[in-house]
């Protein structure tokens, strides 16, 4: 793998594969948490968010200075390729999948989309209907809505609380002027990472990337990665004895039951957790996977589903942000099973807090996690997207050996400490939709 930074500040990484398919992605360090100041007179109840980051992601495809929306949508389609994008609380990512011989066309299109979008008024108006329909569709998915509402309550008053999609009212207020300003101020080369996974010699691909970057951005950057807008998002290598940064992210405590008249009860139990730069990040990953990972032998899956049949599915997720994180247990069940599920969850959490797991059990959990990571990472697209996230977060990409060493270094005492910290008295919050 070859990693570098262009003269103008764009980071890049290229990895050679053995596939006929090539993958490329352009990751931009701005997301929902960066929306303050772009409300166009419309603020939600927390006073921050408009959904503009997600709306920008949608409307980038609606025309550039060189192509109309129809030309953009057909550019890779006619090659049998795919063009896609997504928005998170901290990133916007545009990515493409094509045959390796068409990779240059895909890469050029990604840079074109982020450097010269024009946001035609008619296309913006049409796309509002699409996004509003997407927002309304969440009403038919209480399992997704309950998690978004949980995160909103947990980080209430902070930019991380805002829904990625925005609200119907806020999306209606977004105008072309705000879209143009958002891209101009946030889409800076020093806050971008371009990644490639393809069966192309890395030195050749590196030269091609630098030519593309120079073509679209010129030879020098437009600002510094230490500028105020991004000063609190600087990367540090995990395991580097850094401290969890204090950036005013206060986690609130609540226990709320809302009557939604749903057929199924949906519940989220969780709390703030280690950030991307916290020493305990890998211990938290391991704890989450042991408690409610995708395998049927995870603690909660084994008890709630496999043994007792109280739920169809239960999971424990761990999401990391630059200055905090969230660990949440999510489940859906029949009303008569809710109390039994809650008691079982409390019991298992108390066990993890009260005593360290055995060395043998921890080693088995590490083996399982390493296997899951290796299998999920044996995919070009997954590799490409993960590389971009790592470059933006840490300024480098951990090797498989480094990742393995960090996981293997987790001790029973560290795992217990994280369980006590995350699930400690007065920290757990709960939201139930009945």
Image (cartoon, rainbow, N blue to C red):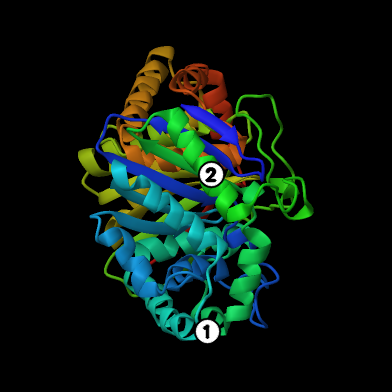
User: What numbered label is drawn on residue 286?
Assistant: none
**Could you say where residue 1 lies in the image, as x and y percent from the top left?**
46, 26
Instruction: Please tell me in which quadrant of the rendered image residue 238 appears.
Output: top right
421 sits left or right of 430 in the view: right
**Near-viewer residue (276 or 142):** 276
User: What numbered label is drawn on residue 211?
Assistant: 2
Check disc 2 and report its element: helix, strand or loop.
Answer: helix
- Which is closer to the viewer, label 2 or label 1? 2
**Near-viewer residue (175 or 326):** 175
Q: Would you say residue 339 is visible in this rendering? A: yes
**Could you say where residue 263 lies in the image, as x and y percent from the top left?**
26, 69
Name which residue lies at 70% across and 29% down: 242
Instruction: Please tell me in which quadrant of the rendered image residue 49 appears.
Output: bottom right
**Near-viewer residue (135 or 152):** 135
**Could you say where residue 378 lies in the image, as x and y percent from the top left?**
31, 32
**Could you say where residue 205 lies in the image, as x and y percent from the top left?**
44, 36
Q: Which residue has dot 1 on it? A: 172
**Near-viewer residue (87 or 70):** 70
Name which residue lies at 32% across and 25% down: 371
Q: Residues within 10 Å of mark 2 (few under 14, many from 20)?
A: some
- Give the quarter of the figure containing the C terminus: bottom left
Name which residue lies at 69% across and 37% down: 244
Instruction: Look at the picture and state if 352 lies above or below 132.
Output: above
183 sits left or right of 80 in the view: right
């Amino acid at each position: 793998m070859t990693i570098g930074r262009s003269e103008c500040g764009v980071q890049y990484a290229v990895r050679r594969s053995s596939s006929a398919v090539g993958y490329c992605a352009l990751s931009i360090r701005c997301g929902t948490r960066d929306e303050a100041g772009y409300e166009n007179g419309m603020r939600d109840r927390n006073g921050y968010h408009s959904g503009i980051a997600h709306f920008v992601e949608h409307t980038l495809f609606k025309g550039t200075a060189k192509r109309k929306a129809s030309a953009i949508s057909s550019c890779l389609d006619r090659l049998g390729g795919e063009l896609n994008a997504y928005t998170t609380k901290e990133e916007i990512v545009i990515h493409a999948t094509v045959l390796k011989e068409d990779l240059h066309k895909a890469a050029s299109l990604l840079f074109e989309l982020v450097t010269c979008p024009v946001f035609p008024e008619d296309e913006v108006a049409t796309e509002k209907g699409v996004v509003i329909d997407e927002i309304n569709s969440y009403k038919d998915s209480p399992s997704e809505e309950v998690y978004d509402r949980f995160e909103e309550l947990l980080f209430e008053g902070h930019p991380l609380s805002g829904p990625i999609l925005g609200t119907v009212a806020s999306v209606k207020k977004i105008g072309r002027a705000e879209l143009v300003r958002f891209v101009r101020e946030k889409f800076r080369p020093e806050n971008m990472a371009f990644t490639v996974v393809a069966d192309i010699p890395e030195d050749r691909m590196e030269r091609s990337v630098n030519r593309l970057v120079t073509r679209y951005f010129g030879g020098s950057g437009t600002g510094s990665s230490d500028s105020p807008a991004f000063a609190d998002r600087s990367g540090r290598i995990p395991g580097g004895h850094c401290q969890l940064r204090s950036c005013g992210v206060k986690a609130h405590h609540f226990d709320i039951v809302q009557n939604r008249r749903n057929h199924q009860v949906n519940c989220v139990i969780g709390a703030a957790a280690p950030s991307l730069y916290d020493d305990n990040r890998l211990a938290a990953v391991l704890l989450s996977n042991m408690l409610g990972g995708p395998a049927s032998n995870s603690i909660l899956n084994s008890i709630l589903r496999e043994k007792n049949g109280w739920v169809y599915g239960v999971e424990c997720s761990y999401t990391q942000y630059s200055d905090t994180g969230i660990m949440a247990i999510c489940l859906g069940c029949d009303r008569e099973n809710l109390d039994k599920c809650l008691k079982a969850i409390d019991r298992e959490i108390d066990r993890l807090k009260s005593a360290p797991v055995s060395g043998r059990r921890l080693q088995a959990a590490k083996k399982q996690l390493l296997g899951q990571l290796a299998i999920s990472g044996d995919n070009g697209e997954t590799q490409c997207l993960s590389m971009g996230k790592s470059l933006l977060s840490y300024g480098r990409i951990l090797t498989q050996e480094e990742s393995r060493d960090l996981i293997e270094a987790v001790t029973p005492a560290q795992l217990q400490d994280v369980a006590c910290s995350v699930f400690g008295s007065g920290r757990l919050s709960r939201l139930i939709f009945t």
